[in-house]
Amino acid sequence: MVDLHTFSIAARDSGAGAFGVAVATARPNVGRLVPWVSARSAIATQARVNTELGRQGLALLAQGVPIEVALSALLRKDGKRERGSR
Protein backbone atom coordinates (compact mmCIF):
# COMPACT_ATOMS: atom_id res chain seq x y z
CA MET A 1 0.00 0.00 0.00
CA VAL A 2 1.28 3.47 -0.87
CA ASP A 3 1.24 6.07 1.88
CA LEU A 4 -0.68 9.15 0.78
CA HIS A 5 0.03 11.96 3.20
CA THR A 6 -2.14 14.99 3.85
CA PHE A 7 -0.68 18.24 5.13
CA SER A 8 -2.83 21.00 6.56
CA ILE A 9 -2.29 24.41 8.08
CA ALA A 10 -4.76 26.63 9.90
CA ALA A 11 -3.88 30.26 10.50
CA ARG A 12 -5.24 33.52 11.87
CA ASP A 13 -4.41 37.01 10.66
CA SER A 14 -4.43 38.91 13.94
CA GLY A 15 -4.60 42.27 12.16
CA ALA A 16 -7.70 41.43 10.19
CA GLY A 17 -9.08 38.84 12.60
CA ALA A 18 -9.54 36.48 9.64
CA PHE A 19 -8.95 32.72 9.61
CA GLY A 20 -7.89 30.38 6.82
CA VAL A 21 -7.02 26.75 6.12
CA ALA A 22 -4.89 25.20 3.38
CA VAL A 23 -4.69 21.50 2.52
CA ALA A 24 -2.30 19.57 0.28
CA THR A 25 -2.77 15.88 -0.47
CA ALA A 26 -2.65 13.18 -3.12
CA ARG A 27 -6.25 12.13 -2.45
CA PRO A 28 -9.04 13.58 -4.60
CA ASN A 29 -11.75 15.81 -3.11
CA VAL A 30 -10.04 16.18 0.27
CA GLY A 31 -9.91 19.95 -0.16
CA ARG A 32 -13.67 20.16 0.26
CA LEU A 33 -13.81 17.81 3.27
CA VAL A 34 -10.82 18.75 5.46
CA PRO A 35 -11.03 22.55 5.96
CA TRP A 36 -13.58 24.12 8.30
CA VAL A 37 -13.60 27.89 8.69
CA SER A 38 -15.88 30.36 10.44
CA ALA A 39 -15.57 34.00 11.42
CA ARG A 40 -14.14 32.89 14.79
CA SER A 41 -12.04 29.80 14.05
CA ALA A 42 -10.41 27.41 11.60
CA ILE A 43 -10.08 23.62 11.81
CA ALA A 44 -8.50 20.98 9.57
CA THR A 45 -9.72 17.40 9.98
CA GLN A 46 -7.69 14.86 8.04
CA ALA A 47 -6.57 11.25 7.62
CA ARG A 48 -9.91 9.41 7.79
CA VAL A 49 -12.04 12.52 7.40
CA ASN A 50 -14.99 12.78 9.73
CA THR A 51 -16.92 15.89 8.71
CA GLU A 52 -18.97 15.79 11.91
CA LEU A 53 -15.80 16.59 13.87
CA GLY A 54 -15.34 19.75 11.81
CA ARG A 55 -18.90 20.87 12.46
CA GLN A 56 -18.68 20.05 16.17
CA GLY A 57 -15.31 21.76 16.51
CA LEU A 58 -16.57 25.01 15.02
CA ALA A 59 -19.64 24.85 17.27
CA LEU A 60 -17.54 24.33 20.41
CA LEU A 61 -15.22 27.21 19.54
CA ALA A 62 -18.19 29.47 18.74
CA GLN A 63 -19.49 28.75 22.25
CA GLY A 64 -16.19 29.98 23.69
CA VAL A 65 -14.82 26.57 24.63
CA PRO A 66 -11.00 26.82 24.89
CA ILE A 67 -9.19 25.16 21.95
CA GLU A 68 -7.42 22.62 24.20
CA VAL A 69 -10.74 21.50 25.70
CA ALA A 70 -12.45 21.36 22.29
CA LEU A 71 -9.59 19.35 20.77
CA SER A 72 -9.57 16.89 23.65
CA ALA A 73 -13.35 16.39 23.36
CA LEU A 74 -13.15 15.86 19.59
CA LEU A 75 -10.29 13.38 19.89
CA ARG A 76 -12.25 11.36 22.46
CA LYS A 77 -15.17 11.16 19.99
CA ASP A 78 -12.94 10.01 17.10
CA GLY A 79 -12.77 6.23 17.33
CA LYS A 80 -10.36 6.13 14.38
CA ARG A 81 -7.89 8.77 15.64
CA GLU A 82 -5.06 6.22 15.98
CA ARG A 83 -5.55 4.65 12.52
CA GLY A 84 -4.16 7.47 10.38
CA SER A 85 -4.86 7.40 6.65
CA ARG A 86 -4.73 3.67 6.05
Image: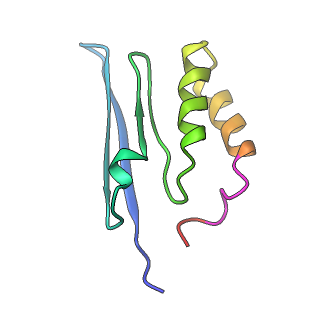
The figure's colour scheme reads rainbow
Where in the figure is residue 69, as x and y percent of width and height? 68, 28
Q: Magenta: predominant secondary structure element?
A: loop
Point out the stretch of residues depicted in magenta. Answer: 78-83
Tally of numbered discs? 0
Magenta stretch containing residue 79, yes or no?
Answer: yes
Where in the figure is residue 63, as x and y percent of width and height? 61, 13
Q: Between 67 and 53, which is closer to the camera in this rendering? A: 53
Instruction: Tell me which corner region of the image, top left, top right, bottom left or bottom right, holds residue 80.
Output: bottom right
Q: Which residue corresponds to the image point at 55% horizontal and 73% vertical from the top-left?
A: 86
Q: Which residue corresponds to the image point at 75% horizontal and 44% vertical from the top-left?
A: 76
Magenta stretch containing residue 82, yes or no?
Answer: yes
Q: Between 25 and 72, which is closer to the camera in this rendering? A: 25
Instruction: Tell me which corner region of the image, top left, top right, bottom left or bottom right, holds residue 2.
Output: bottom left
Left/right of residue 70 with respect to residue 28 in the rendered view: right
In this view, which residue lies farthest toward the bottom? Answer: 1
Instruction: Tell me which corner region of the image, top left, top right, bottom left or bottom right, holds residue 16.
Output: top left
Q: Which residue corresponds to the image point at 36% horizontal and 44% vertical from the top-left?
A: 9
Where in the figure is residue 65, as x and y percent of width and height? 64, 18
In this rendering, the answer to whether 80 lies above or below 57 is below
In this view, which residue lies farthest toward the left? Answer: 16
Where in the figure is residue 30, as x and y percent of width and height? 38, 54
Q: Which residue corresponds to the image point at 41% horizontal and 22% vertical from the top-left?
A: 38
Left/right of residue 61 with respect to residue 3 in the rendered view: right
In this rendering, the answer to whether 43 lies above or below 8 is above
In this rendering, the answer to whether 78 lies above or below 28 is above
In this rendering, the answer to whether 50 lies above or below 11 is below
